[in-house]
Image: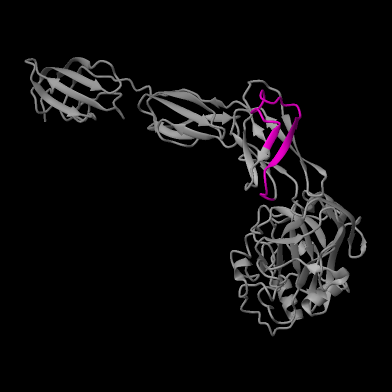
């Protein structure tokens, strides 16, 4: 907690402090406030097996946008949900991070609270955001995932300013103390206790709580992957048993509790509001998001049901532009999920045909009979993309024996995903450094994430051919005093010098032009030079002329 803040400090003073200490940063929690509540329910929140009608927000038709509700993308945050719908006690724009304010708030004026939320919290409520709709489930259960976060954590836990939210479900078989005989299904896992700031926090059911700083604590106050709220729950699941085909009503509500400042929000995962008594089709281990690339990874087609009771026959209907067994793995017309199993997995591979066909599609539909006795169809469209060949460009080098090291580069494009480089030197970057004073041949293999690869070579000609003089004069005048053999830099070699009787007078490995001949008399000598990479030894004669040695 910020050392400047204490629970006894007035709320208005804390707001002023937050206003002066807050820092504006670009956040990674992305909000979309252009969608109406109706669109957010139908196009974002709903998953399989649910039909929704009569969407309202704060008692009005859900056809107008509102500052308290928005879509969100949390994929670049620590929130725990990638995307979905957000309801906030203030404007939703107080939710993005980093958490650089002690008490972020959006005071909306004299907005009313909600009687069900007041019953749940025992406090007066303000700034209520209330989303309601009717729905008909296809199955016998309802579930959706959510995260609750608040600026009230942890400073005001147990101090009578308990922001509150609830998922109030009403309909056949549901009984509770709230309006329309509704029950609150936003419960702490394994309990019948509703989730709230006082009930779930760092000290109570802490395994479900995520500390997110206090507005001044690093790294939360600088890194925009952290949202603004001081704490939030892990992703939790709301569940209820329902009757297939019956009409139910849900009220999703959140409000400030005790006063009208310091915001809270509830995030609901996209597509998670579902009644999963239907078969779902999904692609796992796909080459691309939800799809395939020709000649790439073998994906898994998952056929999943919500229970494990008895054998279940699932009829598969194939459509789209792709041909079964030609463009991809042959898929059967009937799949059986055996008793005791909730799913089966079928390997699915797109075949490389070398044709530039653009994106083809495989449309799969699974037909089953649900618990209502209705025929239910679940469909998925799987794109199949051409594999783009890997293209690698390299260039040979012709040098002038004037560079110790030189860079060589492989320019690569195409392929699928990130390309990797493997040089025969062990280098793993597009550019490596190699000796410039020695000839060399180098190879690079460029691979993509599909496992396709292309190998290219680079030839480096140093311009440093082996040149052996036939005379040198070790007289100490600083000129031509040693046997200077050109083109040996960086090359392993063995040098032997013989007198005219064939006796070795000088022998060395990896000669580096250090012999001055002063240990032998003037005269004619013979040499043999073995150089790695050269097929034959260099041989010949040389003359030592001292002209009066010093």
Can residue 34 be spotted in the picture? no
Q: Is residue 3 above or below residue 364?
A: below
Which residue reaches farthest bottom? 8
Residue sitting at x 65%, y 47%: 342
Q: Is residue 512 magenta?
A: no
From the image, give the main secondary structure of the stretch colored magenta.
loop
Magenta-highlighted residues: 307-335
Q: Where does the image place residue 11, in percent across and percent down from the top left?
A: 75, 80
Q: In which quadrant is the N terminus drawn?
A: bottom right
Determine whether, in the image, residue 431 is placed left or right of residue 441.
Answer: right
Q: Where does the image place residue 68, in percent across and percent down from the top left?
A: 83, 63
Residue sitting at x 77%, y 50%: 47
Q: Where does the image place residue 338, in percent across and percent down from the top left?
A: 64, 43
Which residue reaches farthest left? 501
Q: Is residue 188 above or below residue 427?
A: below
Q: Where does the image place residue 33, in percent across and percent down from the top left?
A: 82, 56
Q: Is residue 345 above or below residue 508?
A: below
Q: Quadrant of residue 173?
A: bottom right
Q: Quadrant of residue 518?
A: top left
Can residue 116 be spotted in the picture? yes
Determine whether, in the image, residue 22 is placed left or right of residue 398.
Answer: right
Q: Is residue 401 above or below residue 271?
A: above
Q: In front: 346, or 307?
A: 307
Residue sitting at x 65%, y 44%: 343
Residue sitting at x 82%, y 74%: 177
């Amino acid at each position: 907690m910020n050392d400047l803040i204490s629970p006894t400090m007035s709320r208005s003073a804390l707001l002023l402090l937050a206003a002066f200490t807050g820092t504006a940063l670009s956040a990674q929690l992305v909000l979309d406030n252009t969608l109406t509540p109706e669109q957010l329910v139908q196009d974002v929140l709903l998953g399989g097996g649910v039909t929704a009608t009569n969407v309202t927000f704060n008692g009005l038709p859900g056809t107008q946008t509102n500052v308290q509700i928005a879509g969100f993308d949390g994929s670049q945050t620590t929130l725990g949900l990638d995307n979905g719908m957000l309801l906030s006690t203030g404007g939703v724009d107080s939710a993005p991070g980093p958490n650089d304010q002690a008490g972020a708030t959006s005071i909306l004026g004299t907005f009313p609270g909600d009687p069900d939320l007041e019953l749940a919290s025992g406090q007066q409520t303000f700034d209520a955001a209330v989303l309601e709709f009717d729905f008909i489930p296809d199955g016998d259960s309802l579930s959706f995932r959510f995260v609750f976060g608040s600026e009230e954590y942890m400073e005001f836990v147990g101090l009578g300013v308990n922001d509150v939210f609830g998922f109030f479900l009403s309909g056949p078989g549901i009984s509770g103390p709230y309006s329309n005989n509704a029950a609150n299904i936003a419960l702490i896992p394994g309990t019948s206790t509703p989730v709230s700031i006082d009930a779930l926090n760092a000290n109570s059911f802490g395994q479900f709580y995520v500390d997110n700083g206090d507005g001044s604590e690093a790294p939360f106050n600088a890194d925009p992957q952290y949202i603004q709220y001081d704490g939030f729950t892990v992703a939790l699941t709301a569940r209820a048993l329902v009757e297939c085909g019956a009409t139910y009503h849900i009220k999703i509500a959140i409000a400030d509790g005790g006063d009208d400042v310091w915001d809270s929000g509830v995030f609901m995962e996209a597509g998670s509001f579902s009644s999963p008594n239907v078969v779902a089709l999904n692609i796992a281990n796909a080459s691309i998001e939800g799809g395939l690339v020709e000649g790439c990874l073998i994906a898994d087609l998952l056929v999943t049901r919500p229970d494990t009771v008895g054998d279940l026959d699932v009829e598969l209907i194939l459509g789209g532009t792709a041909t079964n067994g030609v463009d991809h793995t042959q898929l059967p017309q009937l799949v059986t999920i055996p008793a005791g199993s909730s799913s089966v997995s079928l390997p699915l591979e797109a075949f490389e045909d070398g044709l530039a066909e653009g994106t083809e599609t495989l449309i799969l539909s699974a037909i089953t009979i649900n618990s209502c006795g209705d025929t239910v169809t679940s469909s998925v469209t799987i794109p199949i993309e051409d594999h783009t060949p890997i293209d690698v460009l390299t260039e040979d080098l012709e040098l002038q024996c004037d560079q110790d090291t030189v860079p060589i580069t492989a320019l690569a494009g195409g392929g699928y995903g990130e390309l990797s480089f493997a040089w025969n030197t062990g280098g793993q970057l597009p550019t490596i450094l190699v000796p410039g004073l020695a000839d060399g041949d180098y190879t690079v293999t460029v691979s993509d994430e599909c496992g396709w690869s292309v190998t290219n070579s680079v030839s480096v000609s140093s311009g440093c051919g082996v040149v052996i003089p036939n005379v040198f004069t070790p007289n100490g005048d600083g000129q031509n005093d040693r046997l200077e053999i050109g083109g040996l830099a960086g090359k392993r070699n063995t040098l032997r010098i013989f007198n005219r009787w064939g006796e070795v007078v000088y022998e060395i490995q990896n000669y580096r032009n250090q012999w001055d001949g002063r240990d032998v008399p003037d005269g004619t000598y013979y040499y043999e030079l073995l150089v790695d990479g050269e097929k034959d030894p260099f041989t010949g004669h040389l003359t030592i002329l001292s002209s009066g040695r010093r």
